[in-house]
Amino acid sequence: MRLKDKIIIVTGSTTGIGKAIALRCVQEGAKVVIHGLEANWGKEVVEEIGREHAVLHIDNLASDGAPERLIDKAIKAYGKLDGLVNNAAMVVSSSIADTDKAYLEKVLGVNTIAPFLLIKAALPFLAASQGAVLNIGSVNAWSGEPNLLAYSISKGGLMTMTRNLGDSLFREHGVKVNQINPGWVLTETEILRKKEHGLSDTWYEGLPAMYAPAGRIILPKEIAAAAIFWLADESGPVTGQVMELEQYPMIGRNPPKDTSTIK
């Protein structure tokens, strides 16, 4: 087991990628802190994992003191901390026309500032265990689609922070900081989001090769498989790195923006 006896916090783990990462961490021998906004979903995840392997913390990371409360929950429950997965995020659409100061600050607060504050609060404990931080970003960090402006800005900031802290925290404290940038992932919320945008109930079946060369998009469990490498000791001293997880190169390829072929 690659994470035997490790204690891992996974934010935004009541659903989607975060849930898949938490499940895989436990399969690899870890105990986890499940976090999210939805108490009922969180309880279901803990039951699925097993109460002996997980504790639940419901809190809004944008609220004052939330990062400290989450770290405190892990330490009180397990006495140490080996890994922090910053997965929780607002995945929202916006363009320059409908993004104002307050909206941008709200998105940055959850997607960029909260991960920073969590790392800061967790640092003494991660330093003691020579632990690891894994930030879950997005391929949109590189520029993003026109209708994902605020989200893309927030993920770009997260990526810069990963590279910066990946260097300084490892040199000063022995703590690694790395990032995964997922592409298009078939989460529960993504299925609902596309349906709300007017697509059919089966929009993710038979996608055009331009968007999904494999004929499907990536599954949360496939992101989770990659996450384990960065949380496990086998990644060695590698730090400050960003891994893209998509079916095609993000630089030098421009998929058409017309999604009318996705039914």
Image (cartoon, rainbow, N blue to C red):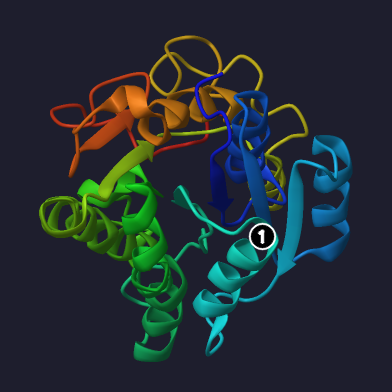
Q: Residue at x 56, y 46 (%)?
A: 7
Q: Is residue 91 above or below residue 242?
A: below
Q: Residue at x 51, y 75 (%)?
A: 67
Q: Secondary structure at mark 1?
A: strand
Q: In this view, which residue lies farthest toward the top?
A: 214
Q: Is residue 9 left or right of residue 240?
A: right
Crowding at label 1, few (<14), some or many (≥20) Cα neighbours within 10 Å? many
**Which of these two is toward me, 170 or 256?**
170
Q: Is residue 164 visible?
A: yes
Rendering quarter of residue 107: bottom left
Relative image position of residue 232 (x, y in whole percent): 41, 29
**Which of these two is toward me, 256 or 59?**
59
Question: Mark 1 highlights which residue?
Answer: 35
Relative image position of residue 115 (x, y in whole percent): 40, 66
Q: Is residue 98 visible?
A: no
Q: Is residue 81 left or right of residue 33?
A: left
**Which of these two is toward me, 210 or 9?**
9
Type of amino acid at the residue the image marks with label 1: His
Q: Is residue 63 left or right of residue 104?
A: right
**Which of these two is toward me, 84 or 211?**
84
Rendering quarter of residue 55: bottom right
- Quadrant containing the C terminus is top right
Q: Is residue 20 above or below residue 84?
A: above
Q: Residue at x 61, y 62 (%)?
A: 74
